[in-house]
Image: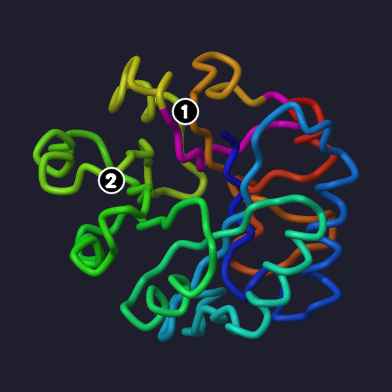
């Protein structure tokens, strides 16, 4: 499975035309050999960050935009889901038929697992050394994505931190050149998550770690 992180409201700027173009350009390069899932980020009150020496708030994705994105992706034969960062976003997402729910690599957000029905699959991003066995005993519906929460991240940090577990899953924040997807090519993970952008994308989620449709076409 390939999970494409379309981000918060940053990359799409909460503009439905950009949302549709993000999905359409993906569909145009997708051979349908892989199971591709579109994932957004839903957060009611995103944090403030430092951007070029100025404190700015991360742009949240509007729920109405997610609803339109979900419908358009369905028309293009894609499943859509989201990472959730708070209970209100989780309750909103649970109204949709999603293949899974995502929890980011933020241990303070893991408490949301108690609010998710046990019949729902949940992907949780975890860092090196995390006690996955204990969490899975408590939450049998959890699957793990191995994640280094740096942007961009160093591929060797993934390899040192996770070793052969990368053949199971990678939440990939590394920056490649063109279509040279080092970790994906070397480990062929069963689950691979990466950020996604367009050529003219701007904002927090569109850094060098995000992949273009023209790059992804080499593995789709």
Which image quarter is the C terminus in? top right
- Predominant secondary structure, magenta span: loop
Which image quarter is the N terminus in? top right
Residue at 65%, 35% (x, y): give it. 35
Q: Residue 141: give its label.
A: 2
Answer above or below: position of 139 versus 15: above
> Which residue lies most toward the right here?
28
Image spot of residue 60 (x, y percent): 54, 81
Residue 6 appears left or right of 51: right
Q: Quadrant of residue 216?
A: top right
Mark 1 lies on residue:
155
In depth, the one of 71 and 1 nearer the eye is 71
Is residue 61 magenta-colored?
Answer: no
Image spot of residue 183 (x, y percent): 53, 23
Q: Point out the stretch of residues depicted in magenta.
A: 169-180
Residue at 76%, 50% (x, y): give it. 77
In depth, the one of 172 and 41 nearer the eye is 41
For label 2, the SS is: loop
Answer above or below: position of 171 versus 89: above
Which is more foreground, mark 1 or mark 2? Answer: 2
Answer above or below: position of 170 versus 4: above
């Amino acid at each position: 499975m390939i999970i494409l992180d379309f981000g918060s409201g940053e990359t799409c700027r909460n503009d439905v035309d950009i949302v549709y173009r993000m999905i359409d350009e993906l569909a145009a390069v997708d051979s349908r050999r892989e199971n591709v899932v579109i994932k957004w980020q839903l957060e009611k009150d995103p944090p403030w960050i430092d951007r070029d020496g100025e404190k700015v708030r991360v742009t949240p994705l509007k729920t109405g935009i997610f609803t339109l994105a979900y419908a358009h992706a369905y028309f293009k034969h894609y499943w859509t889901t989201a990472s959730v960062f708070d209970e209100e976003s989780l309750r909103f997402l649970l109204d949709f038929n999603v293949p899974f729910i995502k929890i980011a690599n933020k241990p303070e957000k893991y408490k949301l697992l108690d609010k998710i029905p046990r019949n729902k699959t949940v992907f949780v991003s975890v860092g090196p050394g995390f006690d996955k066995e204990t969490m899975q005993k408590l939450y049998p519906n959890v699957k793990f994505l191995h994640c280094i929460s740096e942007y961009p991240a160093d591929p060797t940090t993934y390899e040192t931190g996770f070793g052969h577990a990368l053949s199971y899953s990678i939440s990939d924040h590394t920056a490649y050149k063109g279509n040279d997807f080092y970790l994906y090519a070397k480990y062929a993970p069963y689950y691979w998550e990466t950020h996604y952008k367009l050529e003219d994308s701007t904002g927090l989620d569109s850094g060098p770690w995000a992949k273009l449709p023209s790059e992804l076409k080499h593995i789709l």
